């Protein structure tokens, strides 16, 4: 099978989006918020409980509140997939120790990242379980 220019372009786009997603995760772990914010063209998070953080200031407040509650919060990649629609699907472990506690936690979660034409993120949708095709294509993050 010979690779067509379209196939190569899709592959290059997939690699760029995967790298942006990894930069996003790594900079969250090191709490380098300018780097994390630079992975978005429009910062937006949709959480499993239906909460939406939309816009730079709202997302920054969400990050800072989360790290106040769980100062050592971090994520660890389990798997990364490029979906047919160009989204990135992550399976990851979220770990940390709440402030004032001796015992930490680990939750295994999923996230779908949407991108613009410049391969910057426009949204992160977090799921408690692996999202189905409709959710990946743009459905809400709410799973229950």
Image (cartoon, rainbow, N blue to C red):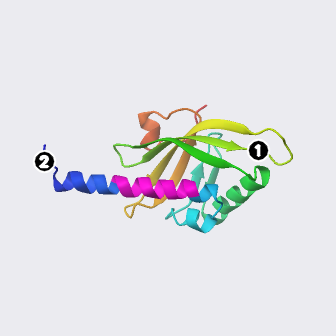
- Crowding near the residue tagged with mark 1, few <14, some 14–19, many ≥20 C-alpha atoms within 10 Å: some
Between residue 105 and residue 46, name the one nearer to us. 105
Quick one: label 2 or label 1, which is nearer the N terminus? 2
Residue bearing mark 1: 97
Location of residue 77 in the rendering, given as x and y in whole percent from the top left corner: 53, 44
Region of the chain picked out in magenta, as a range: 14-26
* 101 to 58, vertically: above or below: above
Alpha carbons under labels 2 and 1: distance apart? 50 Å
SS category of the residue bearing label 2: loop
Question: Mark 2 touching mark 1, by CB under 8 A?
Answer: no
Residue bearing mark 2: 2
- Crowding near the residue tagged with mark 2, few <14, some 14–19, many ≥20 C-alpha atoms within 10 Å: few
Location of residue 73 in the rendering, given as x and y in whole percent from the top left corner: 69, 49
The residue positioned 46% from the left and 58% from the top of the image is 20
Q: Does the magenta stretch include residue 144?
A: no
Q: Is the magenta stretch mostly helix, strand or loop?
A: helix
The residue positioned 35% from the left and 46% from the top of the image is 85
* 131 to 54, vertically: above or below: above
* 34 to 24, vertically: above or below: below
């Amino acid at each position: 099978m010979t690779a067509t220019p379209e196939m190569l372009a899709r592959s290059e786009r997939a690699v760029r989006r995967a790298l942006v997603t990894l930069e996003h995760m790594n900079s969250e772990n090191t709490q380098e918020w300018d780097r994390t914010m630079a992975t978005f063209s429009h910062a937006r998070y949709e959480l499993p409980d239906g909460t939406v953080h939309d816009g730079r200031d709202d997302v920054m407040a969400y990050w800072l509140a989360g790290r106040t509650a769980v100062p050592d919060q971090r994520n660890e990649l389990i798997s990364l997939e490029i979906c047919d629609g160009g989204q990135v699907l992550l399976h990851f472990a979220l770990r940390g120790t709440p402030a004032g506690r001796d015992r930490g936690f680990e939750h295994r979660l999923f996230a779908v990242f949407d991108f613009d034409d410049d391969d910057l993120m426009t949204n992160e949708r977090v799921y408690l379980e692996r999202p189905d095709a409709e959710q990946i294509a743009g459905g809400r993050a709410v799973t229950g």
